[in-house]
């Protein structure tokens, strides 16, 4: 994800994160080798049904129009930004939000939440419980990182560690399930270092 220099609002940060995610995920996909099954904009059928969508997955709307309450935007904001506790990063450090959102779309929120906690612990000498729950303690610990490194460098250090953890996970997936090797090149090309480090330090808070 590339961005123009300057501080951005939380609403803009969320919109940019969703836009980059949709560009990565594409539209409707139904690949028998993909364990996620039918997806549209990266939303799996199971998640869409949980959110109340009843139509065919190829028809899931990206944006909610008047009278339409279930769309990819709403699903991601509710289940992948607000529910896992990522929204404060829209204010504090949008680049970290983008990394969390992108990884959560691929793996579900708990795993990238743990990667964030591990990164903050390792880089900033914190002692967070690595429980996959991003709450006030995780947010506070990240702010401590900012106090140690400064906003931009704290962001880069944490993102680098999160990418390292995700890369190791990709290798583990392929090692355990060789059938997934066909996805490895795309994963590493589009999910590792895909958040522009030049965007670090753009938060409002």
Image (tube, rainbow, N blue to C red):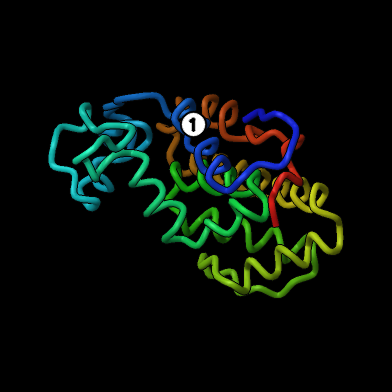
In the drawing, does residue 52 fall left or right of residue 144? left
Q: Quadrant of the N terminus?
A: top right
> Above or below — where is 54 with respect to 185?
below
Label 1: element kind: helix
Picture coordinates of residue 99 (x, y %)? 59, 44
Q: Quadrant of the C terminus?
A: bottom right
Q: Residues within 10 Å of mark 1 (few under 14, many from 20)?
A: few
Q: Residue at x 59, y 31 (%)?
A: 188
Nearer to us in this view, 121 or 169: 121
> Above or below — where is 88 with respect to 14?
below
In the drawing, does residue 138 fall left or right of residue 121? left
Q: Residue at x 63, y 63 (%)?
A: 117
Q: Quadrant of residue 65?
A: top left
Question: Which residue in the protein does label 1 denote?
Answer: 19
> Above or below — where is 184 with respect to 128?
above
Q: Residue at x 37, y 40 (%)?
A: 73
Picture coordinates of residue 156 (x, y %)? 77, 45
Nearer to us in this view, 49 or 38: 49
Give the total number of marks visible in the rendering.
Answer: 1
In the drawing, does residue 15 fall left or right of residue 54? right
State the residue lying farthest toward the front. 66
Picture coordinates of residue 98 (x, y %)? 58, 43
Nearer to us in this view, 135 or 63: 63
Picture coordinates of residue 100 (x, y %)? 55, 49
Q: Quadrant of residue 191?
A: top right
Q: Quadrant of residue 113?
A: bottom right
Q: Residue at x 52, y 25 (%)?
A: 186
């Amino acid at each position: 994800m590339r961005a123009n220099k300057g501080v951005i609002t939380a609403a803009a940060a969320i919109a940019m994160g969703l836009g980059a995610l949709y560009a990565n995920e594409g539209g409707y996909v139904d690949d028998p080798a993909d364990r996620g099954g039918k997806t549209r904009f990266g939303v799996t059928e199971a998640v869409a049904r949980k959110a109340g969508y009843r139509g065919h997955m190829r028809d899931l709307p990206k944006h909610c129009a008047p009278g339409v309450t279930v769309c990819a935007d709403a699903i991601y904001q509710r289940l992948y930004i607000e529910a896992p506790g990522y929204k404060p990063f829209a204010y504090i450090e949008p680049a970290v939000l983008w990394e969390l959102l992108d990884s959560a779309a691929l793996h579900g929120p708990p795993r990238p939440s743990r990667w964030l906690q591990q990164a903050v612990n390792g880089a900033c000498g914190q002692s967070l419980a690595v429980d996959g729950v991003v709450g006030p303690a995780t947010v506070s610990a990240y702010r401590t990182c900012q106090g140690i490194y400064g906003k931009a460098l704290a962001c880069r250090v944490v993102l680098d560690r999160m990418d390292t953890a995700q890369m190791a996970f990709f290798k583990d997936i392929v090692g355990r399930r060789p059938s997934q090797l066909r996805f490895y090149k795309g994963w590493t090309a589009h999910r590792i270092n895909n958040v522009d480090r030049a965007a670090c330090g753009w938060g409002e808070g």
